[in-house]
Image (cartoon, rainbow, N blue to C red):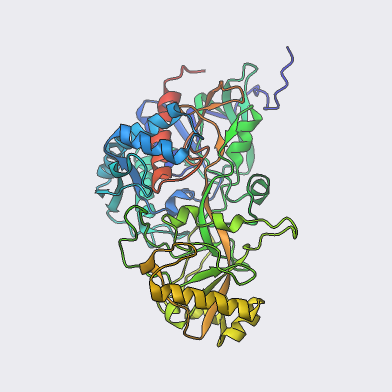
Amino acid sequence: MTDLRRAPAIPEQWDGETDVLVVGCGFAGGAAAITAHDQGAKTLILEKMPDPGGISVCSAGSVRVAQDANEAFAYLQATCAGTTPDETLRPLAEGMTEISEFVESLATAVGATTQLREAPGTYPFPGQATFGYFTVEDVPEFDPANGYPQVRGMPGGGRLFNVVDRNLRMRSIEVRTNSPVTRLIANSDGVVEGVIAECDGKTQSIRARRGVILACGGFEANPDMQKQFWQGKPVVSTAFAGNTGDGIRMAQDLGADIWHMWHYHGTYGFRIDGYPFGIRTKRVPDWRPNEGQTRDVKMPWILLDCDGRRFMNEYEPYMQDTGHRPFERFRPETQDYPRIPAWLLVDEEGRKQYAIGQPLYNQRDVSLEWSADNLREAENGIFKTANSVSELAAGLNVSEDRLRASLETWNDFCRDGLDDDHRRPPISMMPIATPPFYYSEIWPIVSNTQGGPVHDSRQRILDVYGQAIPRLYAAGELGSVFGHLYMGGSNLAECFIGGRNAALEAAKQTLL
């Protein structure tokens, strides 16, 4: 029978070999490599970028954990809404009750301190109360603000990655940076035997005698893929340029099925000419609909569409996940998205509250800070200024009467303590009445994607017929289980749980 697959042929001579080959060095790749090594497998990580960390190092560093696996499973079922088989969700739920022990062991090995705290799920689904967060609180001789000069992120992500990074070094696990993997190599039976990579500027074939684990992230930095899978466009990527869907394409090359391609984790934010990433608005605390907003956190802005109308609750319960979705409305009669870009509007009192923008990135030769009072952003043109409603209407290019009506309605809501249009939490509301007014274009922002190759309960990548592709595994963001709603900290849990499970599967394979 003729082999019609397009994967490269087995080379006559390999340029190198290892037992378990991990593609990507974020939390998932690090957890996979550490686990495979500890199982006695020779392990190699290939990372395409100059520095490890991926988008993981920019995260909050809070790993989602649970007290009860059955309750966690019930909640995951609700959030996935039938988009992921129960048998694939179950290992994640069970792993959430155990993964803190693994992360604790990594932290203890480098003298880091940790914390476990209760943190119920966002939404009032069964099992909501079982969850918590596990975090690394302090790492000796590591400053999260400066420990990784190419990173601007949240302190927790830097601390947690430093723990993983140190554990890789302690085990002398080789991490080759600037080494993008471009193809998977499979034999005539479809068994993955290695990869083709660009290492040190040379094309090399590297054999993986037990298996290949794809932990190379999603496609948030691939606009062409987004155009094909997402309704609203354009969407601006934040934080990391390395996640361009490489693992998805390579897995598809071997017949992998894909899922959850529409679903991404994101909010809304700013786009600046010449700056390679979007800048999300300040991360405000999540709130639970069954409890309401429990902390007095003001959000000083509202969002308006291209006609000057307010169109959404600017402070959804988990804004960092679903904040982008209202932007996706499409007008077929004009072939456009009236909310891309939208307008963020704040007045003088709101401008003083806090830094509205929050840059995040893992990228060399990038540097951007945001001022605490937003004045520098008004001076450099990120915010434009208007001294009256008339001037503001001209700047937004909208009807003055319509803009006045939008502002009057909003200010009445603030006075009455009830957003009768979009149900924004009352204690978050601030009137917009004191000139000067500040306004800026605002765009949907993607932090990370959830789509990718389908995997089973053992992290094995499945083909379009539901069969496992031998010795090929997925971990982390690549092909996440979340296909409907995301739960904060769960991608990090997927990284550690999925990375470990993939490595345990790969490490037990017989040597090729």
Q: Position of residue 380 (x, y in %)?
A: 56, 79
Residue located 65% across and 76% down the image? 398
Q: Quadrant of residue 149?
A: bottom left
Image height of 61 relative to 4, above or below: below
Residue at the far bottom: name it: 387
Residue 182, visible in the rendered structure: no
Q: Position of residue 93 (x, y in %)?
A: 36, 34
Q: Position of residue 239 (x, y in %)?
A: 51, 56
> In the visual, does 497 lie left or right of 24?
left
Residue located 42% across and 54% down the image? 318
Q: Nearer the viewer, residue 4 or 265?
A: 265
Image height of 292 relative to 53, above or below: below
Residue located 64% across and 40% down the image? 202
Q: Nearer the viewer, residue 173 or 125?
A: 125
Residue 101, visible in the rendered structure: yes
> In the visual, does 319 lie left or right of 229?
left
Q: Quadrant of residue 342?
A: bottom right
Q: Nearer the viewer, residue 285 or 383?
A: 285
> In the visual, does 295 lie left or right of 8?
left
Q: Position of residue 210 (x, y in %)?
A: 49, 23
